[in-house]
Image (cartoon, rainbow, N blue to C red):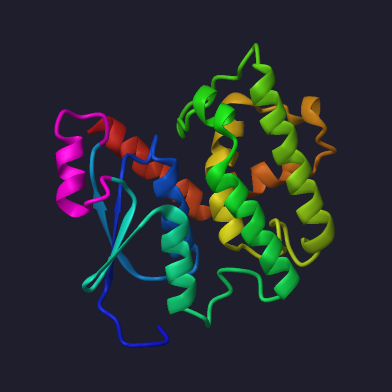
Amino acid sequence: MSETAAPYRLVIGNKAWSSWSLRPWLVMRRFAIPFEESHVRLRQADTKSQILSLNPAGKVPALVAGDVLVWDSLAIIEYLADRHPELAIWPRNREARAIARSVSAEMHAGFQALREHCPMDFLAEKPMQLVPETVELNIRRIVQSWQRCRARYGSGGLFLFGGFTAADAMYAPVVSRFHTYVPDLSRYGDDGTADLYVRTVFALSEMQEWGRGARLEAAA
């Protein structure tokens, strides 16, 4: 760390469903930032009260760093990037960093139809037979965005901006959704770029670790 700090504690929801929890968890695992993992089981009668006892905003994930509480996936990632400037959590290049933040903010605020019709179900494989038009528009925009990022900034690796960054963490739940519901992206303008990206992200050891955690939770 760039300054003395208390250990981090990351409060997350169920790994099968909590797309917002996956994002900062993946950043912390991928960049080897040590943290304690705490769980709140979602869709239970006492879920809301449990979360409120930890976070007055009533949301997971939440990051506890000493006496600092940070909630919201993107805010947590930005906080970690500020605390760890030695890590390339965002691209080092200014232009690439601006675009990475733009596509991350677009993900954070948009694609409502995809969220509604294709909720994250990390362990499932259930391809959609009929894709609503609003969802198709979301998929086409994501595929286009990935293609453009890879073409302009991705030459140094297999991720959106070459090496793994926060932008890849922000889209990791979309990778999971496509794996579950939309395995064939060629129907949505993909030239193979998006398919390779999905396979690359889903194969990450950290994503596989998340999947193992989801299986353990399901079996409990």
The extreme top residue here reads 130
Label tally: 0
Q: Residue at x 20, y 38 (%)?
A: 48
Q: Please tell me which residue is depicted at 43% across the width and 57% down the height of the picture.
A: 24
Residue 50 included in the magenta stretch of the image = yes
Q: Position of residue 144 (x, y in %)?
A: 78, 42
Left-right relation of 41 to 124:
left
Quadrant of the image for the C terminus?
top left
* Quarter of the rendering occupied by the N terminus: bottom left
Q: Is residue 96 visible?
A: yes
Whether residue 51 is in magenta: the answer is yes
Residue sitting at 54 percent across and 19 percent down? 126
Residue lying farthest to the bottom in this orientation: 3
Quadrant of the rendered image containing residue 3: bottom left
* Residue name at image x 48 percent, y 47 percent: 208
Q: Is residue 203 visible?
A: no
Reply above or below: 66 against 125: below
Vertical relation: 156 (above or below) 22 = below
Q: Nearer the viewer, residue 216 or 22?
A: 22
| Pick the front one: 95 or 190 | 95
Judged left or right of residue 182, residue 123 is: left
Region in magenta = 42-58
Tell me where residue 180 appears, x and y as whole percent. 56, 28
Identify which residue, 62 or 128, lies in the foreground.
62
Q: Is residue 177 left or right of residue 139?
A: left
Image coordinates of residue 12 in percent, x first then y, are: 31, 49
Residue 116 percent across, percent down from the top left:
50, 25
